[in-house]
């Protein structure tokens, strides 16, 4: 499919202070847009980033048929732009689409749109260490209809913003035992907008108490650790990694999967298994829980400094040798300082 391109008159990139970028507020010059009408994706185009004109009866605004992805374009040490495992985002987007009764995006449409858009806005891919162009593919249901049924029309967009670290300090998290993020059979494993909406009220309460995020537990017993509001969870116990199985309620994080593969390649044992809150407490009480971290595209690999579980505050040491090693190995693989042994990088030029 040919992508029509309408360029903006003047780039806004020179107005951006790349040393001081707030997450998710300053958007690159252009965006990609394609519509699903009469059973096919039609009229793919790149145009200046700007508002959409939408009906107030838009079905996604009422019934929540909206899914998205998070991915990054970064520069390697030669200045070339790389996309990190983009086909994994494409697969997960389609997984979410199936679960939400939305149409899938063909691989070539997704990849062509992504690469064409990033190439056009290449000046927005930052050069400094730890920064990236954060990319937000988004699909929304666009029927203007108030009946409760799957929409027949959709819009798929790709746009993005330069970002640096999502978290700038070790995370303070609290184990949540009242509210629920996702239940088995629900949509927790899909990257559906409503999952985030449902987390806002409990997360805001935790944030007003000084925590960055909640550590969600299972919906039935609140015994099993699931994930954080923006990321997956790892514990480092006696030098080995533990993370919950995704099993239907937890987002299948691409950074999570990358960490598991990198750790195993470095002979760090990884246990993908259920973790109870009592187990976590026990590890901490016996001095075996030495580190914990969050993984996500936006969060990258973010060390956790404090975990509050009921009345107990688990203070983790600020020295995070395993977290730091995994973070720098993954970064070095993306920037070309270490070989890309898993062939994760898709280079798209400068
Ligand atoms: C990402 O890490 O890309 C996400 O989508 C999480 C989001 C809440 C920032």
Image (spheres, helix red, strand yellow):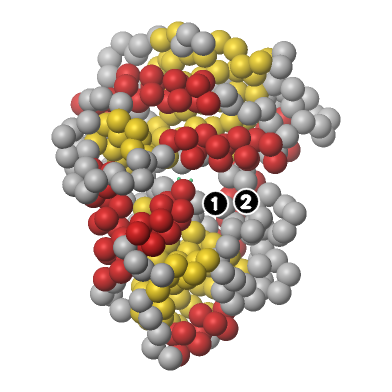
Q: Indicate whether 182 appears above or below 43.
A: below
Please say whether residue 13 is visible from this viewpoint.
Answer: no
Give residue 188's position: percent from left, percent from top: 64, 53
Count of numbered labels shown in the rendering? 2
Q: Quadrant of residue 76?
A: top left
How crowded pointer 1 is (Cα within 10 Å; few <14, some 14-19, many 20+) is rated as many
Position of 150 with respect to 310 (left or right) is right
Question: As drawn, which residue projects farthest toward the bottom?
Answer: 286
Position of 47 with respect to 75 (left or right) is right
Residue beneath the point at 31% across and 79% down: 317
**Circle number at residue 285:** none
In primary-sequence order, the first of circles 2 and 1 is: 2
Q: Secondary structure at mark 1?
A: loop
Q: Quadrant of residue 10?
A: top left
What is the CA distance from the residue labelled 2 to the residue labelled 1?
A: 7 Å
Residue beneath the point at 66% across and 15% down: 40
Position of 24 with respect to 199 (left or right) is left
Residue beneath the point at 52% across and 58% down: 229
Residue beneath the point at 56% across and 40% down: 92
Of the pair 40 and 299, the residue shown nearer to us: 40
Give residue 110's position: percent from left, percent from top: 50, 25
Give residue 122's position: percent from left, percent from top: 28, 25
The residue to which callout 2 is attached is 189
Marks 2/1 in contact by CB < 8 Å: the verdict is yes
The residue to which callout 1 is attached is 252
């Amino acid at each position: 499919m040919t992508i029509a391109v309408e360029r903006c008159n003047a780039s806004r990139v020179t107005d951006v202070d790349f040393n001081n970028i707030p997450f998710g507020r300053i958007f690159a010059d252009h965006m990609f847009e394609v519509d699903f009408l009469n059973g096919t994706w039609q009229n793919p185009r790149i145009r200046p980033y700007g508002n959409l004109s939408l009906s107030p009866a838009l079905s996604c605004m009422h019934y929540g048929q909206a899914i998205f992805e998070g991915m990054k374009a970064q520069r390697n040490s030669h200045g070339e732009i790389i996309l990190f495992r983009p086909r994994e985002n494409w697969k997960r987007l389609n997984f979410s689409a199936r679960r939400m009764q939305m149409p899938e995006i063909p691989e070539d449409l997704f990849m062509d749109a992504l690469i064409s858009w990033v190439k056009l806005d290449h000046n927005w891919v930052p050069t400094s260490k730890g920064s990236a162009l954060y990319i937000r593919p988004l699909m929304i249901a666009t029927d203007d209809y108030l009946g409760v049924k799957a929409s027949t029309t959709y819009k798929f967009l790709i746009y993005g913003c330069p970002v640096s670290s999502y978290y700038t300090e070790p995370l303070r998290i609290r184990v949540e035992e009242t509210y629920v993020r996702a239940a088995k059979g629900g949509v927790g494993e899909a990257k559906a907008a409503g999952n985030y909406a449902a987390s806002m009220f409990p997360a805001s309460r935790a944030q007003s108490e000084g925590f960055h995020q909640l550590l969600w537990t299972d919906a039935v017993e609140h015994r099993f650790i699931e994930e954080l509001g923006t990321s997956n969870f790892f514990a480092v116990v006696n030098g080995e990694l533990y993370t919950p199985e995704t099993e239907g309620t937890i987002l299948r994080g691409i950074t999570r999967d990358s960490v598991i593969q990198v750790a195993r390649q470095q002979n760090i044992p990884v246990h993908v298994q259920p973790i109870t809150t009592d187990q976590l407490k026990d590890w901490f009480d016996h001095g075996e829980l030495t580190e914990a971290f969050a993984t996500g595209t936006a969060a990258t690999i973010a060390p956790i400094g404090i975990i509050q579980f009921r009345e107990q505050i688990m203070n983790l040491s600020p020295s995070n040798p395993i977290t730091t090693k995994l973070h720098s190995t993954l970064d070095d693989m993306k920037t070309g300082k270490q070989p890309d042994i898993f062939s994760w990088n898709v280079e798209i030029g400068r």
